[in-house]
Image (cartoon, rainbow, N blue to C red):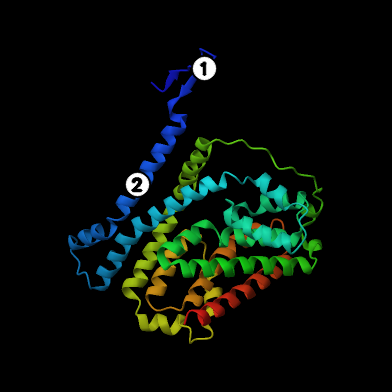
């Protein structure tokens, strides 16, 4: 049975065992324990699997297969854990709450607040249009809105969690610092240009309305459910892109010569950073899907700044996002957005190459 007779003043009250905090807390603890036990077995499992395949481990194909068999469960497991944890954190932030927190914020402080909120809120390029209109209607300044829309997809918890797990805390922390700086400065610059007249007319005519922070009373079970639902929604949508990214990374790892990749994307080639940005713009992916490619490129000797500039361009300046934003921005404002963010990404790429020699 799923319910038991309650013992309170209402003899007819029933308590759903599936909603009991102890059940959820115990289940979550069991999930985390099982996750760590399985994760520790990934290396021996991949070695065992490759040893039983009819391929030479040191051949090009063998290296590609080894990379794919090990990285696929590793990245998917890391993604699941990160998304679950951040799903719980995200339960504290709704679109209405985010709008209310940013409404009326002055530029400068507002840009900082918007960029930081962008790291922890569940929005991506597909949410750009409703978010943009919602922010405008709430009276959020244009530059502050752009700081949020730059940070939300680019400096999100999935990117940071995977960078930390795969490349170390130094890379993740530096990426966070530069990503936030890029979002803050780009939004501030766009705000200083006073380009509100370059919004589409229907957006300009949206009447600013007062907003209030909703008083949400969520229980521990509600927040754990939010984490579970985030895993179902996000991992369920992006797993195919992750597998595709790992497959591309496996090909790079097994077949692309280190010398060739180092010559093309090495720090000694001044043109490698702008070339990487131009290459990243037409590619559609998310952070989870592109990071396995980043891992493979770095393993082959590509420069860190060049690779992360490529990653930033894929996430923040992708062609599909520009098409979506065209519904609310004029072509001139999109051009300014691309120019400002693109310049920032170039700067990040060159600085990373200089810092991580």
Residue at figure coordinates x 78%, y 52% from the top left = 139
Numbered label tally:
2
Classify the position of the N terminus by image quarter.
Answer: top left
User: In the displayed structure, would residue 133 be above or below residue 197?
Assistant: above
Counting from the top left corner in percent of width and height, residue 315 is at 55, 63
On the image, which quarter does residue 248 sit in?
bottom left
Q: Nearer the viewer, residue 53 or 109?
A: 109
The image position of residue 99, as x and y in percent, is: 70, 49
- Asked whether the viewer can see residue 267, the reply is yes
Q: Which badge, 1 or 2, comes first in the chain's sequence?
A: 1
Relative to 283, is 262 above or below? below
What residue does disc 1 label? 8
Q: Could you tell me residue 29's position as x and y percent?
A: 39, 42
Q: Residue 164: x and y, percent?
A: 45, 63
Spatial CA distance of label 1 from label 2 is 35 Å
Q: Are marks 1 and 2 in contact (CB under 8 Å)?
A: no
- The residue at the point 68 percent across, 69 percent down is 185
Q: Which residue is mark 2?
A: 33
Q: Residue at x 69, y 56 (%)?
A: 327
Query: Toward which corner of the image does residue 107 lie, by quadrant?
Result: bottom right
The residue carrying pointer 2 sits among few (fewer than 14), some (14 to 19) or many (20 or more) residues within 10 Å by Cα, namely: few
């Amino acid at each position: 049975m799923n319910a038991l007779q309650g013992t309170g003043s209402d003899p007819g009250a029933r308590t759903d065992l599936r909603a009991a905090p102890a059940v959820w807390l115990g289940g979550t603890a069991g999930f985390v324990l099982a996750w760590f036990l399985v994760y520790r077995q990934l290396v021996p499992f991949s070695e065992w699997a490759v040893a039983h395949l009819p391929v030479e481990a040191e051949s090009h194909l063998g290296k590609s297969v080894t990379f794919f068999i090990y990285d696929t469960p590793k990245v998917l497991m890391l993604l699941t854990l990160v998304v679950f944890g951040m799903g719980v954190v995200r339960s504290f932030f709704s679109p209405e709450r985010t709008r209310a927190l940013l409404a009326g914020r002055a530029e400068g402080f507002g840009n900082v607040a918007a960029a930081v909120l962008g790291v922890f809120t569940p929005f991506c390029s597909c949410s750009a249009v409703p978010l943009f209109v919602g922010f405008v209607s709430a009276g959020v300044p244009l530059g502050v809105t752009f700081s949020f829309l730059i940070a939300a997809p680019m400096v999100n918890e999935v990117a940071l969690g995977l960078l930390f797990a795969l490349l170390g805390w130094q890379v993740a922390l530096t990426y966070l610092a530069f990503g936030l700086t890029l979002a803050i400065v780009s939004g501030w610059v766009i705000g200083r240009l006073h380009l509100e007249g370059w919004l589409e007319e229907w957006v300009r005519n949206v009447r600013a309305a007062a907003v209030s922070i909703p008083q949400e009373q969520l229980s521990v079970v509600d927040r754990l459910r939010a984490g579970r639902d985030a895993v179902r929604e996000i991992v369920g949508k992006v797993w195919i892109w992750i597998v595709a990214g790992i497959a591309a990374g496996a090909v790079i790892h097994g077949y692309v010569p280190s010398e060739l990749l180092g010559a093309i994307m090495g720090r000694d080639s001044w043109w490698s950073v702008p070339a990487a940005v131009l290459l990243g713009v037409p590619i559609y992916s998310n952070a989870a899907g592109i990071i396995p490619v980043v891992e493979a490129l770095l393993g082959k000797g590509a420069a860190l700044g060049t690779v992360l500039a490529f990653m930033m361009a894929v996430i923040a300046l992708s062609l599909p996002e520009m098409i979506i934003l065209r519904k609310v921005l004029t072509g001139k404002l999109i051009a300014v957005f691309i120019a400002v963010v693109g310049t920032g990404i170039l700067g990040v790429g060159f600085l990373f190459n200089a810092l991580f020699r």
